[in-house]
Image (spheres, helix red, strand yellow):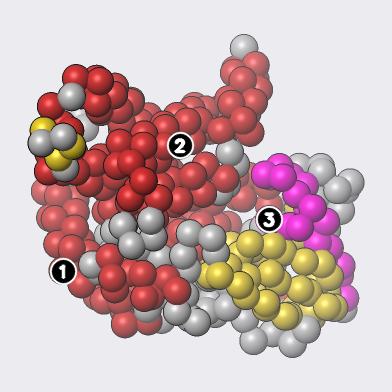
């Protein structure tokens, strides 16, 4: 397999890394992450103009990328800068529309790529624990349309989204794979309530309430009751994006720690000359390379058959969960007490790495999933 990035991809990575270094310094990021809006509209527009959103979508969908490695390159750069803008939502909602949408619905993709529509996936619920098929929100037929009742939790940047891709049960028991349908719900739909709060690691998330939300027939995305496979594809791309983001955050934490070991003196000696710390750092560098291999593997498998794709994604998420936590802990310990202080960007990288483990399924969840998918294989 050829893991050399194409010229376009390299140029995109370079311009994105440069943009983040110049326009998204830690102080700026910190201000944006703590703001009432939870992200910067201005930066979002610049991402659209730079083609960052477009890189996440195929040409057929109005973008100019859309491959697994395009997603990985973009999100690794975002992870390096701890970017809070709603690109993960765009990837997941966009993939669902791309996979299941009709021509009219696919027209929304151009608005997502252009940055004028902020779309996000609303799938997790207050009662769920990463199980893809556990959906309690209900959609019932009403005339030629639908009525939605239920709640969604931890929706990324939900307050600022204009469009939600919502999973709801149209038939079956609460955790059946069959009977899940997907709906496109604009933010200003009557009966939809959005309640936001700050996320632990910066930016904002929201809870959605659906109080007899009336939708037209055109809101159904894909075939009724067949939404599970589409959800799996959309969340799978989200998993790849998060793994790549974690890799970027690990690289940044590694760089900060190496820099600290080279400059911090103790008893008149640079601490980087202490052999015990050299060994710990060498082990950490090897682990980060493992993580990179797992991300490359997942990116390469994103368009493979379902079991190959999902196993590669779960394997990567397991590695990222374990190694991300390790990088967070080791970097902080090698910095000593200062590593815990909020003034130092490192603490924020550590926090983000720990939180990524809990997004879209943690290490335990994906390990079980990887094993279960292996059984399906045989």
Q: Secondary structure at mark 2?
A: helix
Task: Name the residue: 48% across, 81% down.
Answer: 37
Task: Name the residue: 51% across, 49% down.
Answer: 355
Highlighted range, magenta: 124-142
| In the rendered image, the vertical position of residue 360 relative to residue 369, given as above or below | below
Residue matched to label 1:
22
Q: Quadrant of residue 218?
A: bottom right
Q: Secondary structure at mark 3?
A: loop
Specify the quadrant that holds the N terminus: top left
- The residue nearer to you, when weighing 244 against 69, is 244
- The residue nearer to you, when weighing 317 against 283, is 283
Number of numbered callouts drawn: 3
Residue matched to label 2:
325
| In the rendered image, the vertical position of residue 2 relative to residue 252, given as above or below | above
- Asked whether residue 244 is in view, the answer is no
Q: Find residue 325 and report its horizontal and vertical position in percent.
A: 45, 37
Q: Residues within 10 Å of mark 2 (few under 14, many from 20)?
A: many
Q: Secondary structure at mark 1?
A: helix
């Amino acid at each position: 397999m050829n893991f050399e990035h194409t010229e376009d991809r390299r140029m995109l990575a370079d311009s994105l890394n440069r943009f983040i270094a110049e326009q998204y310094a830690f102080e700026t990021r910190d201000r944006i992450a703590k703001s009432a809006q939870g992200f910067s509209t201005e930066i979002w527009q610049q991402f659209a103009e730079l083609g960052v959103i477009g890189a996440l979508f195929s040409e057929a969908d109005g973008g100019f990328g859309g491959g697994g490695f395009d997603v990985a390159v973009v999100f690794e750069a975002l992870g390096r800068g701890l970017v809070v803008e709603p690109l993960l939502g765009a990837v997941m909602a966009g993939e669902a529309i791309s996979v299941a949408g009709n021509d009219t619905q696919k027209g929304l993709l151009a608005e997502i790529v252009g940055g004028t529509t902020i779309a996000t996936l609303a799938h997790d619920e207050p009662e769920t624990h990463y199980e893809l098929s556990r959906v309690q929100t209900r959609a019932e037929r009403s005339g030629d349309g639908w009525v939605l009742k239920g709640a969604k939790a931890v929706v990324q940047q939900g307050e600022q989204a204009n469009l939600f891709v919502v999973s709801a049960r149209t038939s079956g028991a609460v955790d059946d794979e069959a009977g899940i349908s997907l709906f496109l719900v604009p933010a200003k739909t009557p009966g939809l309530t959005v309640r936001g709060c700050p996320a632990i690691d910066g930016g904002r998330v929201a809870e959605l309430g659906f109080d007899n939300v009336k939708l037209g027939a055109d809101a159904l995305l894909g075939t009724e009751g067949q939404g599970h496979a589409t959800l799996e594809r959309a969340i799978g791309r989200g998993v790849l994006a998060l793994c790549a983001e974690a890799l970027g955050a690990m690289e940044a934490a590694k760089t900060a720690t190496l820099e600290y070991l080279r400059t911090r003196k103790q008893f008149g000696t640079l601490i980087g000359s202490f052999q015990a710390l050299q060994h710990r750092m060498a082990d950490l560098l090897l682990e980060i390379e493992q993580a990179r291999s797992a991300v490359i593997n997942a990116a390469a498998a994103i368009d493979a058959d379902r079991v190959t794709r999902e196993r590669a994604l779960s394997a990567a998420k397991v590695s990222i969960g374990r190694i991300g936590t390790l990088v967070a802990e080791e970097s902080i310990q090698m910095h000593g007490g200062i590593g815990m202080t909020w003034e130092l960007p490192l603490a924020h990288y550590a926090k983000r790495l720990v939180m990524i483990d809990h997004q879209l399924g943690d290490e335990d969840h994906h390990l079980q999933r990887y094993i279960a998918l292996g059984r399906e294989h045989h």
